[in-house]
Image (tube, coloured by chain):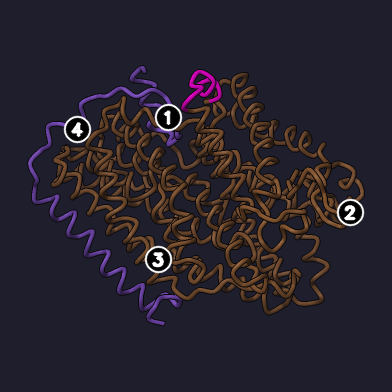
Amino acid sequence: MADLTNRRWYTGMLTQEDWWAVWLGVGFFFLGLLNLAGIDIVGFLTYPTKWVFNVPEGGKGAIGHAFYAIGKKTSMVSKEFYKGMGWWSIIWTYVAFTIATCTGAAFMRWNLKRFFIGWTIIYFMTIATWFIGHHGFIAANKINMHKYGLNFALSLGGGGSFILALIVGLIIGNFFKPFAIYLSEAAKPEWYIKTAIVTLGVKLGYLPIKLAGFSHKLGKEAAGLTFDLFIAGAAATIVAYMIFWPITYLIARKMFNLPRKTAAVLGSGISICGVSAAVATGGAVRAKPVVSIMVSALVVVWAVIELVVLPGFFTHVWPKTADPIVAGAAMGMSVKTDGADAAAGELLDEFMRNKIAVESNGTVIWPEGIITASAVMTKVWIDMFIGIWAFVLAMVWVYRIDRRPGETVLASEIWHRFPKFVLGYFFCWFFLLAIYFGPGQGGSADAMPYLKTVKAGAVPIEGPMRKLFFMLTFMSLGIITDFKKLKEAQFGKMVWVYFVALFIFIIPIAMIVAYLFHHGMQIPNIAGYVQ
Amino acid sequence: MAEEEKKEMSGTGTLTGAALEAEDVLADAEPWEPIETKLVVWSLVVAVIALLIGLVVVPTSILH
């Protein structure tokens, strides 16, 4: 690793996706906080709502209101301005994020022209699928479908849009390959999801503020719940990972007779966090670059399969709505790649919230985002663990397996392998918690006007921006997923190692470990406050 | 794909749909060595220790 010694702790701050996810997420978060100074410049962010072609008398869902600027509902200072924006908010959002993402692309030295065109196409395709996915037939449920004049609805909530975006992306990625290759410069699911995860930190920090708006007690409950997730997620992750890796390594070496380095990279790719782990371990054990790339491609394809299967499985088979946090945590440990995991968590969140609302006939309503947060929390811990594990493997390989005389492994390698977007996630979360417990006085009645101003800045980021970046992730994930690659690259054994490890060991173990640490965790019921 | 480009990609962690070259990285498995046994066993030992400590310390575990 001699060539890495010139790196400084700040290396990559302007050239890596990880850091640009932080700049985008934290940058817009601070733009939102300008509300505290009486300036609302994030209220234009566009958001969809359920719509139908024919609105029943006295019902909801006019197509003209299918997209609106979020400031119409949240802004304290410019509500009237944002009210008039309607569908134009799509263009405002496009302009803002085009400037932000193109700046990032330029610093990361991507082909700016191709990125701009690709981004534009992906953005508007995403908006189109977001719109279609919010048709009442797809998004409404038994409780509210009559307001839209419907007698039947699929009850998919916002999850329908995610699935649709993934399907559209997969169609492009598998049937319109030249177009997919053209879009690939802007189809960056890892970047989009890391940005979404940073904004999920805003969501997590905002939860107590939101629930304090309902009642002081609920706000405290939410703050406690996020801390519990943080601690339980850490314990579950270390336990699960230290079981996953050796088992996968054993399967690859003993059952499938793979070489050591390939087995080590596969072990990390399958058991931890797909792409980043495969790349980090590949570097640590000095596997050929093609191994990391092959494992990464495999991880992406399997992650998409998990993304389609697991949210439905956890919602309808086990643990169902009895233990939604267990389901979320198990998701975080089972689905590899940040993108697919956070996306699957979001889908699970939508499915579970719709299911509990239907099952309880509307008497139980869970705030959105907590199940997603439980899925992301375990993932975030796993991401942080990658650097440490890559460091351990590098030491084992350098000093024991390859026995390279005179070579040393620098401790700074842990920092360089550290997923930097996690810093943005924690920063936003703790910043808002500090506001809640500090000037927000833990949600006391006196501080509510102040917290409402914070809310006006936080909601556009944790709602519209986060959801948009999730949608972009689903679309991009589909675009870069080429199922034919499994065949072409003659993965053979690798596919089977993945299959055996994932379905026979990793998912069941993830479910058991998630149960041991998260069983019984309750999501606050806000039905009495939102109806 | 050029070797340089592949190295660049492997260093970024970026998901990419770029073309793959099927190199023979699946053959010629080395014999199992004692250090591998140690690596596997110690990982599992750490897992068990972390599980026991976690169950006791984490307030949301099933022991509480």
Q: Which residue is mark 1?
A: A482
Q: Amino acid at mark 1?
A: Asp
Rendered colour, chain B? purple
Q: Residue at x 64, y 76 (%)?
A: A220
Question: Residue at 47% across / 76% down in the picture?
Answer: A520
Q: Position of residue A158 (x, y in %)?
A: 63, 51
Identify the residue at image location x=71%, y=57%: A145
How far apart in space, not on screen, are marks 4 and 3 (Cα)?
A: 33 Å
Identify the subunit bearing mark 1: A
Q: Earlier in the sequence, mark 2 or mark 3?
A: 2
Mark 2 on the same chain as mark 3: yes
Judging by colour alone, the chain drawn in brown in this rendered image is: A
Please tell me how crowded label 1 is: few (under 14), some (14-19), or many (20+) other residues with Cα within 10 Å: many
Same chain for labels 4 and 3? Say yes or no.
no
**Mark 1: secondary structure:** loop
Mark 1 vs 2, N-terminal side:
2
Q: So how many labels did they put on this image? A: 4
Q: Which residues are magenta?
A: A174-183
Label 2 marks which chain's residue? A
**Residue A328 seen from this side:** no
For residue B26, the mark is 4
Mark linked to residue A514 = 3
Q: Marks 1 and 4: same chain? A: no
Q: Looking at the rendering, which quadrant does residue B32 occupy?
A: top left
State which quarter of the image contains the N terminus of chain A.
Answer: top left
Whether A74 is drawn above or below A481: the answer is below
Q: CA distance from mark 1 to mark 3?
A: 32 Å
Sequence order check: which comes first, mark 1 or mark 3?
1
The tag on residue A77 is 2
